[in-house]
Amino acid sequence: MGGLTVMYEIDKQKFGAFVASLRKEKGLTQKELAQQFFISDKAVSKWETGVSIPDTALLIPIADLFGITVTELLMCQRMEQANEMDSELVESVVKTAISYPEQKPVRVYQVRNKWGRIYVLSLIVCCIELIVSLLQGYATTGLFLITGLSIMFGAYYCFLAIMKLPSYYDENRICVYSDMWFEMSFPGLAFNNRNWQHILNTGRIWAIVSMTVYPLVNALLVYFFSEMWLLEFIFVLPVTLGGIFIPVYVVGKKYE
């Protein structure tokens, strides 16, 4: 072969069909496959329909998950063990070897920290405030919507979130984070381990403050304003719900 460089072009349609067949063999849905790599199920759909192929940082973890080699993944076929390929072809197909940690990600609840205790105390306060609001006639749709979202997102931020993003988030610009039922997508904001802890802390603060403070604010608004439903949808809900997205984006960009 001498100094000849062999270029290998991946057939996106063939690649997508191969990934789809491997996924079905594993009995996984597109969403379940996406959750393995903390990406959106839309990304997996694009792979399988031939619109795009995975970033090179994901090749090793995808191949490992399906129990094949990276070469087999990119060649879109299983290969006999005795079938040897030219070393230069293998190099052109595999490109760059990217390390990927095999261990499961460490989640917040597995590490000793203060956020779990703060969340539990805040949840108790929130429940007491909700009961009082019901008894006093201050309960509104917005109250239960905002506190419900705060409780749900707070549980993820304070207990279920992963402590560290996979290394390919640092090596590539990825604007989507997907884990279990939780998903974040901010156009123009790349998630990585430089801003991840700041994003988590911002989400935790928003959830805890919303859980404990909003029931009091809601009671005051109901007491002083008769047209509460109009105030909720024009001012309270947009401002409160926007309070999580804007700070997360600003903090994420600052430490990106």
Image: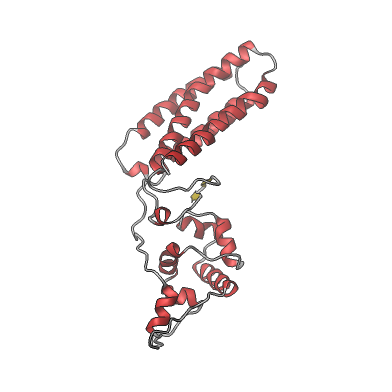
Tell me: 44 left or right of 70: right
Quadrant showing the N terminus: bottom left
Is 35 or 171 nearer to us in this picture? 171
Q: Where's residue 249, x and y in %?
A: 50, 39
Is 24 or 45 nearer to us in this picture? 45
Is 153 or 170 nearer to us in this picture? 170
Q: Which residue is drawn at 39% across and 47% down?
A: 162
> Is residue 41 shown above or below 113?
below
Q: Where's residue 19, x and y in %?
A: 53, 70
Q: Residue at x 44, y 56 (%)?
A: 172
Number of numbered markers: 0
Q: Residue furthest left?
A: 112
> Is residue 16 shown above or below 231?
below
Q: Tell me which corner region of the image, top left, top right, bottom left or bottom right, holds residue 232.
A: top right
Q: Residue furthest front?
A: 3
Q: Residue at x 39, y 87 (%)?
A: 84
Q: Where's residue 97, x and y in %?
A: 37, 68
